[in-house]
Image (tube, rainbow, N blue to C red):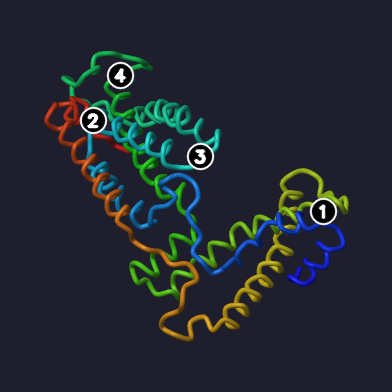
Amino acid sequence: MTAAEAARTAAADPADAGAVAASPVPPAAFDPFAESAPTGRFLHALNPLSKLLAPLPVMLALVFTRGIAIPVVIIALSMLLLLVGARLRARGILLLVVGVPASVLVLGVSFGLWTDPSRVDPAAAGAEVVLLQAGDWEFTLAMYLVGVATALRIAALLLLSLIAGLTTTGPEFVRALVQNLRVPYRIGYTALAALRFVPRFGHELEVIRAAHRVRGTDHGRGPVAAVRRSVSLAIPLLASSIRHAERVALAMDARAFGAHRTRTERTISRWRVRDTVFVVLFWAVAVAVYWWGLTSGFGDAGTDRIQLTL
């Protein structure tokens, strides 16, 4: 409404003049190309490369780590970091708090069964405690501890990888690789386009199955029917995949993808001071944990000398 129209409205009806004067100021124009502020907790605001660089030395050290104490501390710290710094749903929190310890206990039995009893040190803790016996074969507590130590290392590696996996999307990671590590954009964005085919194929498969159910298609039961059902799903899925690949290729050609050595970026991936602080603090805590484990003796338990034959 212009000023002249507002004046005429005020003269016609004084009550409307107050409404015009009290009307809110229209918001500023939205810039779709502006860098959006990160949402969620602090891990989501970090550069993806910092969340990959910080756990990497610890993951390499865990491969050569024996014993139980150091992996347990790393698991606890990683779990605390994810609970505090990542945006998790109730199901994810339940899997972290309950699923990880339960998986370690189950995998401990599995890895312990694969342990060669002849290589178990008789002086190791629990070597004389028999948990299960079948003929001449004995499953001792020391074998179970070896399995638990192996399972703990796997769980620690998994949790360290989840620091970047749960708080970083595919486009963010590719942008960080292209802009910060100077990976050729032809490789980065082509790989990202290929990864996005997977959920697309899943959606197309559900659509095809729904269409078969609507049409009342019934292939029967048995192995022959299963093969016929798979073929009936594979052919339209393959045709849809080819059409989608052609559309993606045409869209990339229309945007001159690959025509130049560099491209402009809509969203800028920056390495900030907080990323450096996160990496340095992560490494400092990891060094402190290993120093404590090795100097206190907890990182050199008797079960460390047991060799596994997997």
Give the quarter of the figure containing the C terminus: top left
Determine if residue 244 is in view: yes
Determine if residue 208 is in view: no
| Type of the residue with mark 1 | Ala
How far from the left and from the top, in percent, is residue 10? 81, 62
Q: Which residue is mark 2?
A: 67
Which is more toward the observer, 254 or 126? 254
| Image position of 74 (left or right of 265) | left
Instruction: Verify CB contact (< 8 Å) between mark 1 and mark 4.
Output: no
| Image position of 232 (left or right of 242) | right
Q: CA distance from mark 2 to mark 3?
A: 30 Å
Label ID, residue 15: 1
Q: Which residue is mark 3?
A: 88
How far from the left and from the top, in percent, is residue 132? 37, 16
In this rendering, the label closer to the viewer, 4 or 3: 3
Local crowd size for mark 3, using a 10 Å CA cut-off: few (<14), some (14–19), many (≥20): some
In this rendering, the label closer to the viewer, 1 or 4: 1
| Type of the residue with mark 3 | Leu
Q: CA distance from mark 2 to mark 1?
A: 80 Å
SS for tag 1? helix
- Of labels 2 and 3, earlier in sequence is 2
Which is more toward the observer, 4 or 88? 4
Q: Quadrant of residue 1?
A: bottom right
Q: Which residue is mark 4?
A: 140
Which is more toward the observer, 60 or 73? 73
In this rendering, the label closer to the viewer, 2 or 1: 1
- Of labels 4 and 3, earlier in sequence is 3
Q: Quadrant of residue 142?
A: top left
SS for tag 4? strand
